[in-house]
Image: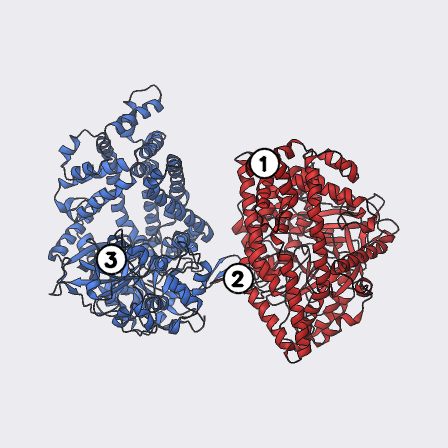
Chain colours: A blue, B red
Amino acid sequence: MRFSPALFLVLSAFFATTARGDGEMWMPQQVPALGEELKAMGLQLDPNSFADLTGFPMGAVVWTGGCSAAFVSDDGLIVTNHHCVDGSLQYNSTAERDLLTDGFLARTRGEELHASPNARVYVTTDIDDVTKEIVGNMPAGISDQERAELIDDRRKQMVIECEQSGDVRCWVRSFFGGESFLRLTALIIRDVRLVYAPAQSIGNFGGEVDNWMWPRHTGDFGFYRAYVGPDGKPADHSPENVPYQPSHHLKMSTRDLDEEDLVLLAGYPGSTSRLVTADEVRIAEQITMPREVRLRTELVDILDAQANGNRDVQIANASRIRSLNNYKKKYTGVLTAFSRDGLLDQKLNLENELAAFYGANPERADEYAALRREYRQLLEREQSTDERDAIFRWLYTASPLLEQANRLVRTATEREKPDGDREEGYQQRDWPRIQADLRRTQQSIHVPSDRAGLRWVFAKALDLPSDQRIDAIDAAVASAPGVTQDERLEALLDDLYANTQMNDLDTRLAWAEADRKSLLKQSDQFVAMAARLRTLGDTIDDETSAREGAQYRLRPMLIAAQREMQDGRLAPDANSTLRVSFGTVRGYEARDAVYYRAQSTMDGILQKYTGEPPFDSPARQIQLAKDRRFGPYTDPDLGTLPVGFLSTCSVTNGSSGTSALNAYGEIIGLAFDMNWEGVAADWVVNEDVVRTIQVDSRYMLWVMDAVDGAHNLLQEMGLGIHFPEAANLAAPDTGP
Amino acid sequence: MRFSPALFLVLSAFFATTARGDGEMWMPQQVPALGEELKAMGLQLDPNSFADLTGFPMGAVVWTGGCSAAFVSDDGLIVTNHHCVDGSLQYNSTAERDLLTDGFLARTRGEELHASPNARVYVTTDIDDVTKEIVGNMPAGISDQERAELIDDRRKQMVIECEQSGDVRCWVRSFFGGESFLRLTALIIRDVRLVYAPAQSIGNFGGEVDNWMWPRHTGDFGFYRAYVGPDGKPADHSPENVPYQPSHHLKMSTRDLDEEDLVLLAGYPGSTSRLVTADEVRIAEQITMPREVRLRTELVDILDAQANGNRDVQIANASRIRSLNNYKKKYTGVLTAFSRDGLLDQKLNLENELAAFYGANPERADEYAALRREYRQLLEREQSTDERDAIFRWLYTASPLLEQANRLVRTATEREKPDGDREEGYQQRDWPRIQADLRRTQQSIHVPSDRAGLRWVFAKALDLPSDQRIDAIDAAVASAPGVTQDERLEALLDDLYANTQMNDLDTRLAWAEADRKSLLKQSDQFVAMAARLRTLGDTIDDETSAREGAQYRLRPMLIAAQREMQDGRLAPDANSTLRVSFGTVRGYEARDAVYYRAQSTMDGILQKYTGEPPFDSPARQIQLAKDRRFGPYTDPDLGTLPVGFLSTCSVTNGSSGTSALNAYGEIIGLAFDMNWEGVAADWVVNEDVVRTIQVDSRYMLWVMDAVDGAHNLLQEMGLGIHFPEAANLAAPDTGP
């Protein structure tokens, strides 16, 4: 791989600092500069090896588009989380054969199942610094909005050129708030097959009840295999395809694991906000998140009231309610952690330190002060329309019909442009995803609930301050018949729901192919409302672009100042690119007088076991556990089978399936969740409580060896078999 | 005090054993033999001092009838749990002055309030071995029932004689299953006054939510004062009375407390079942407790259904439901712990060891085997009517009206006998309690709920096996009009509820004074039914006496065998007499990967604090905590204010308020609960998890000093004042 050295040269001054950096998500190229530290923590590999994306171990780390994963054999065997392969288990299930419940094991290559038409494996092969190409040669006097749009155009153009060959997928990602842009190139493998997953009672043990929670006892792992054409190149799914031969793969560890052992996570974390300013924290803490919690609570109450004991309505609204509640819970937890950790004060202190750091040099001090001032003004401008913009976004959350209409309008509008000029998400490459979304939404449509939600959010819009109105809604209500505003609102809703086909999937699928003119000719009132709302939508998009353009100017300088003060020791926010997080196996003080130990064991499964989901387990597993037949997978210190462990590494969405490596680069587990006390880790890493939850490799191997008899895979990975009698068991797939 | 030495001589061989005996409830007289062990654990007092009930420290330990307590000043100041003084707070509250909520502080003696007419303080002054007097000279050929009745008569007679003076209360208690009988003599102080209790938001912080739970943050403490007549003798409540001068009092400790520090509990544990046989465990585990859980669940469901949203019905049934649920929860926990700890196997192993212990001596082996056989036959005989007897007992739980009628019938029946011949609980000395019970029951009477409960339990009676019938119910149903049994049952219930005055308190109070003949002449159908049920009740009482008589013969021998094998190291089951339990400050593994530390702190109060009961706190307390103003009460290792701690001692009902002493005999805390994981401690002490929860003396003193300004009491106890500004606060009693 190629990489401009200039960008990371500053890292050389690292060792002046004392903080260890547990939980940061380092770019692979930053790891060599952390070498001394990693060696002190026990690393046995050459720290420089992490910068080589095609070497060991990084060459074995892959992405599925939503999850992280890793090659574990010469024949393209891939390990990731159970919840990353569960879609494939569902895809291959039938009324007679419930793979999700029973699990699945292919004992031969021929038994492996097509994971799904959309399953992909991305193997990052190159990371190139394209900062100059993206932000260089900006025309003089360009406005912030023009800057953002130009950067956007250049990125899209670069991606289209990069993907010409058809065998690769490319991304141009911004790092450090736009300080640098890197192009990532990944081989895209299109034939992915399902090899093995334990029963749901192992892979999802604890279910929603244990979600976010420690101690955890979930066997959250499964196996795919990557296939390519006989010529070794990516190919569509076909019986002729052969297993992909990766240049490197990782070994599953059976070594003992102890507190304070080194842990390295190599995966694709999605997105974090750790480098934001104090003002941005204040807005999130005092305005955005409390509002999100409030609005979610209100909408959930409305949807709950709609069901009123009716099971069909409950089912229709279930996934919306679950999603609203999930984020409500998360934001509530984040707000608690903000307050617990004093994040705002931390940020203010950091900014005061920065001001003091530059204080000795009046010119730089003035420069920094001006920078902060302009960035603050930018946020103030954003805040001046924040209530309106928030309610505008919530229109589409409150009414799936309006969201679908909006999508059709935008699809039709963007389609009229050349592909490279279209908005991200509406390009040719996004077409399959758009269709899938249209289909999936159908199950969440329940017209009375939709109307109740739309009435609620329209009423919110009608309550907006006079300088933040949504004209399309004001006009529509004003022109509806009725004496009071309430009457006019009801009349508008009557008209909207009486004159729409948005609740019909076939109509939506057909209209998604229409051009803008013929779409609008359908006289669908939801489509018409969505089109009228686009005026404000476009304004907001323009304002967003202008803000982004200014941020591209300002944030790199703010972040560079921080990096300078920290002697170069600064990891960029996560952005779905390959990262390395390091730390150690460690427990934490969960609350007063309660200490959570770093390792969970089979004892906990027996304690939690009820025989009913989510605390069910295969009978054979329970019997082996009661007989304490753990063979060489027993942890010598714990004296029982280890199941999960905590590390001081941190993860975020997209990190699922990330391999946890020991000092030798062997897989000691798979990250699959973070702990509740660390829920604010996307914003700030409080090393006292932020932990990643991994399933222990020894538990995975014991399940494969003793419970499911997946001996063919153990052999393929070069591992021994200690429960030969399990080979004769019925496979986890107990269907016909 | 006097004590026959022969009984405890066997203790001299103690040191051959290795187990430390944490959590056992030793008789004070047994402590000297444990001296070496206690010294090794750090005891600085003379171990022999514990055997002297009128010396230090035992002379300072008292009983309130329901709780344990201790003198803490020369002027009769007594410290016990908040939940032991809350009745006095309620008794002294008015519509304008809510002492329970606000707390109460008497700044002068004159402000102290009469605790309640029934409040008593018992100071044990003598324990005498009366075994010979009670079980000696048994007539030849006496039956088991006659034996039990003779023992009963002798005990009652001895108590009446002992209490002649009027200033003492006496009990004759059986130890080691009837192996020995001790007479306990206690000074009875009849003028008890309320001195101080913190607000409920301190004294009951956590409430029902935290009940049984660790970590705990309840400031469960309060103060009484004992008053006597000017002549120094016990007297009825009067303004002329003066504070009682105890011969000894305990000092409140402000020393540091660490894990593994020695803890001694000196109090009055109520009752345990640790010395029962394997057969008795089996019956409890497989029959009695599962049935109790099942019947409680059914009755709670019936009472819940009665309320159906009606608040008045909910209130009427609340305390019944709470009590049913409390014991349901407890029995469920005990059953889980039995299974976790393998109690039955432990008991079987112990009995096999005993058999082996005697194996070398054929004569003793035969003797022991015969003993076990006869004891088992005794239990089998009990089991042969167990279903009937259980339903018979449940009649009175299911219907408070029937329970009240039964009480009237029994009171009238017993009153016809000389006081010494009456059943325990129906003697002259029990009269105030009987009246109080009649009054208290009134608030739990809700006739439709009563009828639903009675219908349910009558139906159970009608389902009993043919050899275990309750004839009075069979006859009543058979003679009621109706074609089907259901119709006849409804007709019987119609008649019962149409022709009773049991729901009228005044009637009950009047009838409680009536003789049997005039009571029965009232033609109250509940009284008539209760009288007819007494036939079986008397039979069951006779059977119980016969069984007790046999147990008096057999259990001492079984227990003596166990003591012999254990080199004399055996504590008797708790029986509401003064005991000493020792152990250390220690945390425990609550479940897989979760370790509960031994000490809780103010941090936990801030974490739990919501501002709403049960997680409310006085504003001043929260402010001081946020400012970390803990003064010298700060724990040097924890760096914050300690609130509660765990010890390996064990407690049971009646232990509430027990002083926890350090190696110097100073009060380091008050025991107020046990932990959920140790819920089976009444049956077996699993040292890994059985813990007592104490409130830390430093938290008590900080609350008194800094929050409530109870400086007069700190001075009386010879302690310093570190928050002088708190003296000017409004007292916790903020009423007019």
Q: Residue at x 70, y 55 (%)?
A: B544
Camera-side residue: B23 or A91?
A91
In the displayed orientation, state which residue is furthest to the top: A483
**Residue B346 circle label:** none
The tally of labels here is 3
Which corner quadrant of the image does residue B40 belong to?
A: bottom right
Residue type marked 1: Arg
Residue type marked 2: Ser
Badge 2 is on which residue? B339
**Residue B488 circle label:** 1
Residue type marked 3: Thr
Callouts 3 and 1 on one subunit: no
SS at badge 1:
helix
Mark 3 Cα shell of 10 Å, populated few (<14), some (14-19), many (≥20): many
Badge 3 is on which residue? A64
Is there a contact, CB below 8 Å, between mark 3 and mark 2? Answer: no
Q: Tell me if residue B714 comes above or below residue B500 in the rendering.
A: below
| Place of residue A449 in the rendered image (x, y in percent of width and height, measured from the top left) | 33, 34
SS at badge 2:
helix
Callouts 2 and 1 on one subunit: yes
Measured Cα–Cα span from mark 3 to mark 2: 46 Å
| Place of residue B192 in the rendered image (x, y in percent of width and height, measured from the top left) | 77, 48
In which chain is the residue bearing label 2? Answer: B
Going from N to C along the chain, the mark reached first, 2 or 1, is 2
Q: Tell me if residue B245 comes above or below residue B137 in the rendering.
A: above
In the displayed orientation, state which residue is furthest to the bottom: B360
Measured Cα–Cα span from mark 2 to mark 1: 43 Å
In which chain is the residue bearing label 3? Answer: A
Camera-side residue: B304 or B144?
B144
Q: In the visual, does B324 lie left or right of A209?
A: right
